[in-house]
Image: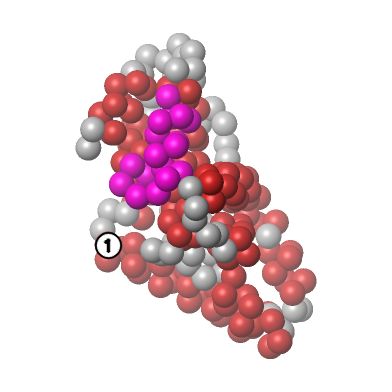
Amino acid sequence: MGIHKYFRSLNELERIIRCPGKFKFEEHSVAAHSWKVVQYAKTLADIEEKHGAVIDWKKLYEITSSHDYGEIFIGDIKTPVKHSSLQLRSLIQQVEEGMIDNFIKEHIPDEFKSIFYQQLREGKDESLEGLILEVADKMDQVYEAFAELQRGNTEKEFVVMYRNALIKIKHIDLKCVDYFLAEILPDMVNEETLSPIDIRQITEEALAL
């Protein structure tokens, strides 16, 4: 079926709901998440460029737009489960990468196989673009969890998601992270909320770690 099979498969990302099994005021699909990650990443990259960094924009757009494609095969596994151990995270990644490889072998024409292997690979690494992807991915966790906490959702998982994502972001040494922590996060925390959850305290505790 060729590349048509790939294009058709993208619809499945619209039907995979993030953070399954928990009460949410607002549902988010993997497709919506991927779109937001691209938006965060391009702004984060602009900030890095303002500070003299050289961005490989083609690579950045490839890895951010496709970073969760593998969830078509395995679904959205809850973050606390996925990261409960390095061994489990490694096994999940191996399964995901294996299924992507099989999909490419079976459905992508030979002339495009190398391109798809490049584009659908795991993009989070120690390169500048890989680190920006990591920050952007965690930023969407922050925003999704914050929106639930702000509305008064008392599910513990959203507190954990918010705190852990902030801690991860804080320990990535990029100029865009400095800007996020100094300029963007305060605006978020200062938004009016009627939530019984003390978001400011959770934020301060996370940033102190």
Quarter of the image with the N terminus is bottom right
Residue 108 position (above or below residue 159): below
Instruction: Name the residue: 70% across, 56% down.
Output: 11
The main secondary structure of the magenta stretch is helix
The answer to which quarter of the image holds residue 156 is: top left
Instruction: Name the residue: 71% across, 87% down.
Output: 111
Of all residues, the one furthest to the front in this rendering is: 52
- Residue 65 lies, in percent from the top left, at 61, 57
Out of 57 and 145, give the one closest to the viewer: 57
Query: Could you tell me if residue 153 is visible in this image?
Result: no
- Residue 50 lies, in percent from the top left, at 53, 46
Residue 153 position (above or below residue 29): above
SS at mark 1 in the image: helix
For the record, the magenta segment spans 169-186
Instruction: Name the residue: 68% across, 88% down.
Output: 110
Quarter of the image with the C terminus is top left
> According to the image, label 1 marks what residue?
86
